[in-house]
Amino acid sequence: MDANDTVGQIFTLLYAYGGFVLFPLVAIEGPVVTVIAGFLASIGVFRPIPTFLIIIGADLTADILYYSLGRWWLESIFTKLTNLFKIKPQTIDKLEAELKRNKGKVLFFGKLSHVFGLPILIAAGHAKITLPDFIWYNLLAAVPKSLVFFLVGYLLGNTINNYNRYVNFTILGIFVLTLLIVTVRYLSRRIVKRYLTHHH
């Protein structure tokens, strides 16, 4: 399934079912859903503030789950876990060492990444970073990151809505959202990969 299909399906689910599916979708695919939620908020499908709070709550819930895998369940299911998420044990070890040296920066930049994010969340638990610290540094990155995605979607929706007399609103919206999300993912991977490379 390509990116356009994914965005189209999420768009349809959110438009049809609203808040009932927002929380689980954000937990599964945060940035994509956040942009689309902002887009839908701009055309009146969602209320902006409650929607944004749900997004932050769902994002944090998913991250705590991965943290918990590393802290409390990793030893007993380590092999299955690493196979499932295709994470090498050496990667967890390296990230754990880096977290112990500079937990704030690693957690912050890890939250911005779609490549290193999951291993860093698991490694943070395995390194026994305290849960309050984990939540604090996570929120420091999650709130502005989610706000940017949400506002981009919101502004995009406003822009397209102003010209919806001349274009197919849904098709153009999905196309632009897909292009935007792919671009943001690519740039975030490059930035975080460069940071982690220079700090090892």
Image: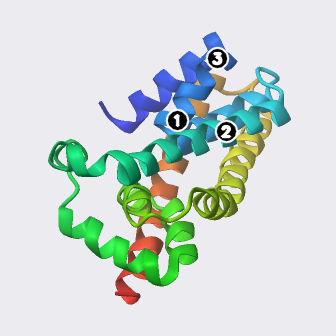
Q: Residue furthest top?
A: 16
Residue 26 or 187: which is nearer the viewer? 26
Q: Could you tell me the amino acid type at mark 2?
A: Gly
Asked if the residues shown at circle 1 and circle 3 are in contact, with their CB atoms under 8 angstroms apart, the answer is no
Q: Nearer the viewer, mark 1 or mark 3?
A: 1
How far across and how far down the image is residue 157, in percent? Answer: 73, 36
With respect to residue 48, does 181 lie above or below? below
Asked if the residues shown at circle 2 and circle 3 are in contact, with their CB atoms under 8 angstroms apart, the answer is no
Task: Please tell me which of labels 2 and 1 falls first in the chain.
Answer: 1
Q: Nearer the viewer, mark 2 or mark 3?
A: 2
Residue drawn 43% across the image and 58% down it? 125
What colour scheme was applied to this rendering of the protein? rainbow
Residue 16 or 160: which is nearer the viewer? 16
- Could you give the CA–CA distance between mark 1 and mark 3, rounded to whole angstroms? 18 Å
Residue drawn 46% across the image and 84% down it? 101
Q: Is residue 141 left or right of residue 51?
A: left
Q: Is residue 112 left or right of residue 87?
A: right
Q: Could you tell me the amino acid type at mark 1?
A: Ala
Residue beneath label 1, please? 27
Q: What SS does tag 1 mark? A: helix
Residue 33 or 170: which is nearer the viewer? 33
How far across and how far down the image is residue 5, in percent? Answer: 40, 28
Residue beneath label 3, please? 15
Instruction: Please tell me the numbered disc located at residue 57.
Output: 2
